[in-house]
Image (cartoon, helix red, strand yellow):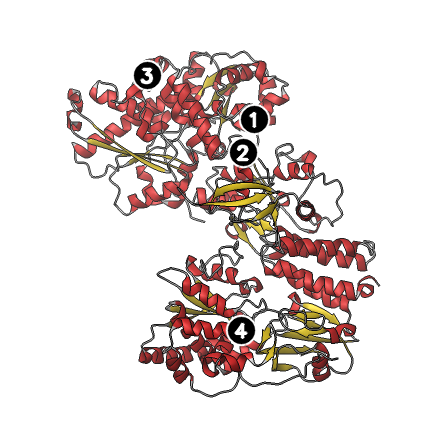
Amino acid sequence: MANSHQLKRVDFIFRNENDWEKVLSATIKNKPQELINELISSELKGRGGAGFPTGLKWKLTAEAKSDEKYVICNADEGEPGTFKDREILSRVPYKVFTAMAICGYITGAKKGFIYLRGEYKFLKAELQKVIDEFHYYCKETGLDFEINIFLGSGAYICGEETALMESMEGKRGEPRNKPPFPTQAGYLGKPTVINNVETLVHAFTIFKYGAKKFYDLGVQYSRGTKLFSVSGDTPKPGIYELELGMSLQDFVYEFGDGDTKAVQVGGASGFLVPRKKFKDAAIGFKGKLTGISLPTGGSMMLFNSSRSMFNVLDNYLEFFREESCGQCTPCRVGCQQLLLGIKAVKRGEKPASYLDKLLRLTETMQLTAKCGLGQSVANSFSSIVENFREEMIY
Amino acid sequence: MSKKVNVTINGFPVEIQAGKTILEAAESQGIKIPTLCFHKDLCVAGNCRVCVVEVVGQTRLSAACATPCDEGMEILTNSLKVRNSRKQIIELLLSEHNADCTKCYKNGNCELQTLSSEYKIMTQDFLELVPLKKFSIDMYSPSIIKDDSKCIRCQRCVRTCAELQGVNALTVSHKGDKMKITTFFEKAMRDVVCTNCGQCVNHCPTGALVEKNYIEEVWEALADPTKHVVVQTAPAVRVGLGEELGMEPGSSVTGKMVAALKRLGFDSVLDTDFTADLTIMEEGTELLTRLKKALVDKDETVTLPMATSCSPGWIKYIEHMYPEHLNHLSTCKSPQQMFGALVKTYYAKARNLEPDKIVSVSIMPCTAKKFEAYRPEMYDSGYRDVDYVLTTRELAILIKQAGLDFNKLEPMKYDRLMGESSGAGVIFGATGGVMEAALRTVYEIVTGREVPFKNLDILPVRGMEGIREATIKIENPLKEWAFLDGVELKCAVAHGLINAKTVMDSIKSGTSNYHFIEFMACPGGCLGGGGQPIPTNPEIRKKRAEAIYAEDRGLPLRKSHENPEVIKLYKDFLIEPLGEVSHHLLHTKYTKRERF
């Protein structure tokens, strides 16, 4: 346990200081280049789950040549077991808007959008009030930036950044071919920064307190803090801001019910970690801290011994079968085959060895699916089937 | 000079223009990467994923059709990783596909079948998904059959309907396992904006969209000794048919086709080109009449520009999309329907046949013609004017079923009475052809001189550009056309309904100043029709067009009004263009339709 990291509760995100006007006007007194450097030196990575360096994203968009650019806040929080963005938008929305405006100042974008999950419609009126106030202050500061809310319609795939843009353009929400990436050709074909809600709040923290304060938290490759949505078999479900880099062992010690069998890190598209691997698993982006590292959008689902892992996987696969956009073969057909396949094995209609064929199928899906959805089905499938093979069969 | 990038494909260096895709780079080296959703007519979708290749250093595979070459890329098109993934994707497609190949109309001409044969998919380990889904077959349209159980969701048809045609009759609905290609509120194809152009059929890689075939009906008619079966062949069929029978694109097979039709047992093998010439007489006269009314009589009820009415896909398109502009259409029936009306009247009388004993068959490059023959207006002879319409592809099936060795057939000539044609009739098969044929005749009627173009080739209206324009100034006309002196006749040609939309929008907004416009529903005109051999793509269309113009150049008659059989028809039967008999048999009216 030499590398074990003590669990550290932090309070940045929801700290309610009500000084965003000051932060905004102070920040935009700096040159865009200085701000980008500040962001890059913080090593902030996207908090939606993919972990792309935020500073680099803003830099690429700032360098792209175009008369129009956009900033989009991805609030299509659809990953099963994630509910942090809702909380951010209800408690500290102005931090998100301020970061978007600063991003606009840096990249040259004059328009921003909140892509709000359809189920979060109840937040819209309140958000609009804050936006109106925000617009008023932007004018006072002399900053030309405007934010609009775009309401999603309930498709999980629209959380994928290019599908989200297609949906905003009035088209069917289907992921695009990449390249080009949104930093070159995003919404309406123009350079676009698209960030998760939480990422933007961290950017706010960095511009307010400086990169160093953020960088000093967390571990190498995984700097700063992260919001976790804790659910499942736990005595204290809820949202917690924790330092990155903790081991799963410590996490379960804090949040488990004493009978934790496995933890699903990162929602349906994340990984399932069985008890015997808790101490080897660290929550972070890259760089093997102590065995496996687990990038995450923040969903932590705990399962105790009363849960059937077959049912858990069955549930995820049903979700993917329905939420695949359906355009690419590996994802559309693959998800159907995986779901029906494990059922067939369970019923004895296919031999246990059929699970190996399905594991190979998830490899193909990971290699060839068009977007992150199809590519990441392999994560939960292989981690559950490999660790709980018995439960799949008997 | 545009920038070049250097990559390697399977270890061999390749220099290629920046921006070109991996698929294009491989093609330039003669390396075939399999594709399904890719089609040269359409935008890149990248959704079937069979074209995945390995780029060394990247964790995931890339879709070759959608990935541009970057400097230094090391591309592997056939690594083990690629092969295994590709094979599994084909297996997945087959598991979701009604793979009852021996009972499929597209058996032998199916891209999925070819691919699974190339990759030797011998077993089906995955679960069969087709029986779990309730698929229905839409057979209500007289032109197109849509069978969802054979659909592989490549969306070629959707892109065709949107990008080439601007019709959007087909679209994607639902998501995940329920995702499918469908119409507005899942209505039948016959009840939506579908123009029956058949471009979706021509672009479908499998048997999900096929023409409704009338092969057995025709065999039955041919076997019936009490019937006199007449066949007409459209201009574009003669430059496409060869492809279905193993020849290179651009082969002109007029004589062989006539010989084959005679051997199939048709009692009379005639030419739609004959009524193409007749169309020019009627339509040309109609144009001149409209011009006279507009310019001399200042009649404000006359609608200009006048639009051609030969293409039934275009007719149904304007009926749906611009129902308030139907007055622009020439009232002339299409050559097919003029032919049908004459066969059961003029021809029957001249050959001393009972019209109800005549079965009138037409061979068309088109699926919309099937619908056209079915229209209630098309019974002017007192009978159904055209009984059965076969596409170029169906004719090839007849020829193969009859066991004819097409290559060995000695060319023959069309039968007489309605078998003679001019080069002007032949070029109806290419975009711009109707315009060129009309100008050759109209100009000469008005001025008494040939059109002022070398060899009668009116090059400005030829080509493959979506919309083309030409202006011809009329100078020193004959006395009765003096009002046209100095008039600049402004013409336009549009092919592919997406281009027709652009022109129609300019008419709608009042910014168009044309007198006469040729519209063809299909890209390239009839030679790129929905009933033509599969595949049809830009290169093949170009070759077919060259063959058509070569045919025109080789004919002794080049002008419609000089066709002796047409002259005789007017003398013996019709009396004059736009006369009473013409009005009854050769002209029609149009129907306003809904837009969904």
- Amino acid marked by disc 4: Leu
Dot label at residue A63: none
Residue at the spot 53% in from the left edge and 23% down from the top edge:
B242
Contact check, label 4 and label 2, Cβ < 8 Å? no
**Residue that carries the numbered disc 3 in the rendered image:** B570
Q: Which residue is mark 4?
A: A44
Quarter residue B526 falls in: top left
The residue type indicated by label 3 comes to: Tyr
Residues at discs 2 and 1 in contact (Cβ within 8 Å):
no
Q: What is the distance, in whole Å, between disc 4 and disc 2 at their CAs? A: 51 Å
Q: Residue at x 55, y 28 (%)?
A: B393
- Mark 1 lies on residue: B244
Cβ atoms at labels 3 and 1 below 8 Å apart = no
**Are the residues under badges 3 and 2 in a single subunit?**
yes
| Secondary structure of residue under mark 4 | loop
Who comes first in sequence, dot 3 or dot 1?
1
Q: Residue at x 46, y 72 (%)?
A: A37
Q: Nearer the viewer, mark 4 or mark 2?
A: 4
Residue A385 in percent (x, y) is at: 76, 63
Q: Are marks 2 and 1 on the same chain?
A: yes
Nearer the observer: mark 1 or 4; the answer is: 4
Instruction: Determine if residue B449 is in view.
Output: yes
